[in-house]
Amino acid sequence: MKTLIAFHSRSGYTRRVAETLAGDCNAVVDEICALRERTGVVGYLCCALEARGGRAPAIMPARRDPREHELVIVGTPIWAWSLSSPVRSYLREHGGELQRVAFFCTMGGAGAENAFSEMRDLCGKAPVATLALTDRQIDARSHEPALVAFVKALA
């Protein structure tokens, strides 16, 4: 099955999960990049405001056409208990084109259900699987059983 992992990562947690999943699923990756940098404290505050406000900032064009993949796994960090704004932009642009979807998120503590609900709405379809991981799980490497279960659910 031709699989794409489209993700955004500000701090690196979502990238780490995306890269692991790419190896486990024999998938290609496409990082969703905002046109404007979001670094430091000011960047963090902008991220939170955009996420909570439902904003969709300008993003770089996708390097890979998601329509060419049977499954697109979309990964997002949780910002202020919400979907990250660059992923919102990506799904507004491409969500209706996706054949099958799966979602994963990384977070400090909470917000996965809100993000998954919005992602489902933007795609117009239910995901075949979801995966929510905390940064603490990723740091402790205790997330591996959840990753295995997620990959198995994709088949």
Image (cartoon, grey):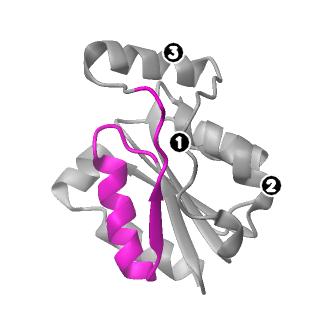
The answer to which of marks 2 and 3 sits earlier in the sequence is: 3
Task: Say which of 62 and 103 sits in front.
Answer: 62
Residue kind at label 2, given as amino acid type: Gly
83 vs 92, nearest the viewer: 92
Question: Can residue 131 be seen in the rendering of this structure?
Answer: no
Near mark 1 (Cα within 10 A), the count class, few <14, some 14-19 or many ≥20, is few
Apparent side of residue 107 relative to residue 102 in the rendered image (left or right): left
Badge number at residue 96: 2
Q: Is residue 24 above or below residue 109?
A: below
Residue 112: horizontal and vertical position, in percent?
Answer: 53, 42
Compute the Cα span from label 2 to label 3: 26 Å
Q: Nearer the viewer, mark 1 or mark 2?
A: 1
Determine the CA span between mark 1 and mark 3: 20 Å
Mark 1 against mark 3, which lies toward the viewer? 1
Q: Amino acid at mark 1?
A: Met
Q: Which residue is mark 3?
A: 49
Residue 19 drawn in magenta: yes
> In the figure, is residue 30 to the left or right of 126?
left
Q: Position of residue 101 (x, y in %)?
A: 66, 65
Q: Nearer the viewer, residue 77 or 88?
A: 88
Magenta highlight range: 8-36
Give how far across and how far down residue 154 sits, in percent: 58, 78
